[in-house]
Image (spheres, helix red, strand yellow):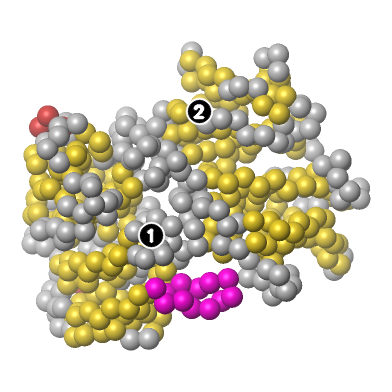
Amino acid sequence: MKSTLLKTIVASSLLSVLAACSSDDSSSSNSGYVQLYNGSYNSPYTRLFVDDTERSGADFGDVSTRHNYSSGEYDLSFEYVDANDSYITIDEETIKIKNDQTQLLVMNGDFAEPTFTELSVPTSSDEDEFNVGFFNIVGEDNLYDVYVATDDGLFDTAELLMTSQYLVEPELATLEEGYYTIYITASGSTDVIFESPTVYFNDEATYMAMIRPSYATEEDGITLDVVTASSSVTQLNHQDAQGQLRFINTIDDYTQTQFKVTRGTTATNTEVVSNDSYSEYMSMSPNSYSVAMLDEAGDTIVDNFLMTLEREQSAVGLFYNDKDYGPRMMTIEENLTPSSYSHAVTVVNLIDSYAGQEIDEVDVYFTLNGETVEDTSNVVEGLDQYDQQEQVVDNEVYTTYVVFEDNGQQIVLLQQSDMDFTEEGNYILVIEHDETTDSGYKMTLERTVTEQS
């Protein structure tokens, strides 16, 4: 479960607070915990079974719930559900639950043959102190030095904490409770490749930070996923990382457009692109920007739309025509993770009428061969006009239906067969009006994936 515990304390810099251990961790017991961290970059949601009982699971970059068991041996299995709703076993392990420890199972690598590593993590630390370890799942050829800085948070004053080798369980460091900035370099180098925001580590807690590829906007970038005792992950992004923007115009009245992004006195224009085509990415600093759409000659069509970009965020500004208010812009956050077994599809609904009547919402069904709209579990229900919603689909080819209900009657606005979701990555699906088609509507599918290897 992704944590939302990072808090902005002051406007000029990001100070974040990591969750403290729950109070039941502070005393000795005859029990411990088991938990799964999913670091497999192309994996689907992976489920943890303990002694044949399904407990919880995790997507990439996330952890399952911690589950408490009496000390002793237990059989684990790791499974996912395929397109036929069958449970597929990935691996099986036997673990020993230990008193006041969390057995953290880390899955990483290609999901076709993932690696599982068991880490024993104390559930607590001493008063006024915390434990922290850094576990490297980037790759065999990657060796990292981890530094921490206090006070001014500068690398020049940082101290080397440990060297993190690939899949080698770290020895935990014990530090005083307080604010820290984490720096990472290639081992033996003083060139910083990762700088965290300033974060607060609570006492009597143990943190395990996963060093993993970011699979975002930075080439060969890394991210820290800090696993806490609250069954959550706090994701720390590189403070010098850029974001990226691109744009698409779906308004047929403007066949050739370009886009201008402005902050202060600095303006950057895209190239001219045809409508329903995506512009090239623009690498930009994390900030808020004013966005304009221009015609081919550079004259303004609409101006002053606000777009905010975060570190390592990839975003699309989609221009569309609101029947009541004219041109508008919608921001879509792109998922660049190289997913292979399932894919996140962001469905955007720009349909607002049918046969002269207004349509407030539609349902979108993804069906396999021989599967009806009633049978499928892959459905976006009640998607409002000019809105977006995400649905995860399996690595399959679907027939997709866009349906609305008129006085109890289901009307198929649009259907498209052989919609292929079998390429690595995730997708944006835009449904909109199109007077050139027999149905009067169309779907446009775009794949989103990082270029990071």
Q: Which callout, 1 or 2, points at the residue further toward the start of the chain?
A: 1
Q: Does residue 38 appear to the left or right of 378 in the view shown?
A: left
> What SS does tag 2 mark?
strand
Does residue 3 appear in this view? yes
Magenta range: 79-90
The residue indicated by pointer 2 is 282
Q: Position of residue 446 (x, y in %)?
A: 62, 45
The picture quadrant where one finds residue 16 is: top left
Q: Does residue 281 appear to the left or right of 22 in the view shown?
A: right
Instruction: Tell me the distance, in whole angstroms, between the alpha carbons under discs 1 and 2.
Output: 30 Å
Residue 80 highlighted magenta (yes or no): yes
Q: Nearer the viewer, residue 378 or 132?
A: 378
Q: Does residue 431 appear to the left or right of 99 in the view shown?
A: right
Q: Identify which amino acid the numbered label 1 is placed on.
A: Asp
Q: Position of residue 233 (x, y in %)?
A: 32, 57
Residue 347 highlighted magenta (yes or no): no
Residue name at image x 54 percent, y 57 percent: 343
Q: Nearer the viewer, residue 351 or 248?
A: 248
Q: Position of residue 449 (x, y in %)?
A: 50, 45
The picture quadrant where one finds residue 373 is: bottom right
Assess whether mark 2 and mark 1 are in contact (beta carbons under 8 angstroms).
Answer: no
Residue name at image x 38 percent, y 59 percent: 110
